[in-house]
Image (spheres, rainbow, N blue to C red):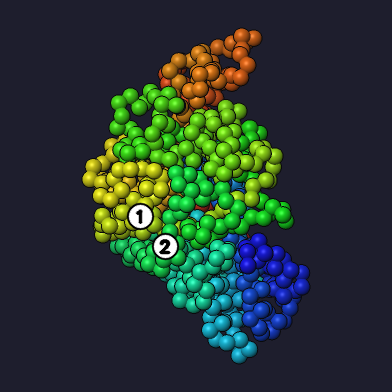
Amino acid sequence: MKLLKIKTLAFLVMLTGIMLASCDLTEAPRDTATEEAVFGSEQGLQLYINSLYDWLPSANDIIRVDYVSDYGARRDVPPLLRNGVSPTTSDDTSQSGWDRVALGGDVHWGWNTLRDINYFIVNNEGDEVAPDVRQHFNGLARFFRAYFYFEKVKRFGDVPWIDRPLDIEDEELFAGRDDRAFVMERVLEDVNFAIENIRKETDGSRTLITKDVALALKSRIALFEGTFRKYHSDGLASGLGNTADQWLQEAVNASEQIMQRGNFSIYTGAGDWSYQELFLTDSPNSAEDILINQLDGSIGVRHTANWILNSATTGVRFTFVRPFVHTYLNIDGTPFTDQDGYETMLFHEEIENRDNRLYQTIRTPYYSSPRDGDHRLQQPDWAYTYTGYQPSKWSEPDKALGEGTVNTNSVPIFRYAEVLLNYAEAKAELGTFTASDWANTIGKLRARAGITGGLDALPTSIDSYLQENYFPDITDPVLLEIRRERGIELAMEGHRFYDLVRWKRGELMAEVWRGLYVPEANQYYDINNDGNPNVYFYTEDPGDNRQDGVFYLNVAADRQLTNGTHGELTWRESVNKVWQDHFYLYPIPESDLLTNPNLEQNPGW
């Protein structure tokens, strides 16, 4: 059963009154059917659980989350980073509703889904259904509760732990928040219960919650919590630093179970273009996808990647920055920034002989479609990009650009590459990472990307560029390379902001947005090196002296060059971006504090 069909079923269930109407913590329960109709048969249990799938992030949610990150510039500075602008009062709508880490707009204190989950768990009892069947469905419900609370703790830190549906008379409605350690122990119990009791081992459609999916969730949760406690032990995780290794070991164990079960592998079926093909197929990739958002154009279930990533007027015009592009290795496995003169290389020079994922993540002259040879996306579109590094990941080359919701390529919620990266990072943090582990994780990902060197042996030297620009406190070359790999492999998949949060590297969010290098303004440049000029960066408007086929770009306004008439492009450098440590947690919305002062505000807000 595909996820989109599940959601259709959930809608039908609501129409027929099988499930409860949603209500928030402060609302009284409103039954629209008897409990017997829902809990008296396996079919009733299945229909109820199906409705919970609607809570999972949509395709648009996932592909837009990284629009706020250190490695991307965008049309405007996110509200949180503009000094004094609180997410609770901003009107930023650049992010989708499920996980708006655009640091503005709806910060998701809502609890409707939790009530639906708890109602199911509390009432799923009786002799009409076999005990193991009930436990299977309880496992699914507790998977959703673990996922729900993980997202809450990531955003707010301490939150109220509620494991039953509340009535308006319940005193718990006006209780304070439970501490992080207590809540996360309950989350771990829930996800372990799910792993133990969900009957379905794996699913060919990659749209159902299975043991594999529950293990992948545990791997993600445990890595986040372990590293958060380690790197925030002197602040938000005070007193929890000595428990970090326990969580990191849980991440290792969960990841290792998936690896040993053998249901997934790194997809290499499209040769050098395998990475790109992962994100362009309409059907799930049976090798690598663990859980996906399945799209279906025949019934209008699509997403907007082509529209958002190619339109000059729609969305925030997310575009990568040069320091991140410099982290992509050379094809021989050596750091790009070890080359003399890399700082002043032109665009067509700096993309020569690089990690294949670079060509499959941004527009370059090497872009092609493995399916139809379409070369439409050969160079940056300056009507879209602010830096010159325009994303191509998720954007289908055989789809018309800028025509609305046209994409039907599936979007993974969990994929095997993330599990390998979780495993590698957790073991490196624990100090137990071996050369064999490297070959089976980072080595496999880099081999898929065409990299030829360093696939089997642990790195022994520090990449000074990566350390100085990204992780100055990390002295372990292995951990540095794992962090490099995570950023590149999972780019634009919704992980980056919370990676920075758990590593306590939020200050990277305040860096100047830098683009490609321009040797001299007021001259014509051949960006894609095809023998024809195609862009002119000017500080003085050339007026009527313009050539056809050339894009004229003003670098004396919001775009500037770092040295006046030459240097790297910068975007909105004049807008002050500020990172403060209390930004690692969202504020509790003011309306909820007024209703229940016992919640208390997070520090600094």
Drawn side of residue 355 relative to residue 5, left or right: left
Earlier-in-chain disc, 1 versus 2: 2
Asked whether 392 or 366 is in front, the reply is 366
Image quarter of residue 5: bottom right
Residue 472 image point, x, y percent: 30, 41
- Tell me the amino acid under the disc marked 1: Thr
Image x and y of residue 185, in percent: 42, 69
Please, what secondary structure does the residue beneath circle 2 have? Answer: helix
Q: Which residue is at 66% across, 79% downward?
A: 43
Check disc 2 and report the residue beneath it. 219
Residue 405, given in percent of the width and then of the height, sits at: 68, 46
Which residue type carries mark 2? Ser
Asked if 100 appears above or below 70 in the picture, the reply is: below
Q: Residue 441 carries which label?
A: 1
Relative depth, front residue between 91 and 210:
210
Q: How far apart are marks 1 and 2 (CA)?
A: 15 Å
Q: In this view, does 165 lie above or below 486?
A: below
Q: Residue 531: which numbered mark, if any?
A: none
- Residue name at image x 45 percent, y 20 percent: 518
Relative height, residue 290 to residue 142 (above, below): above
Q: How crowded is mark 1: few (under 14 residues within 10 Å), some or many (20 or more)?
A: many
Q: What element carries label 1?
A: loop
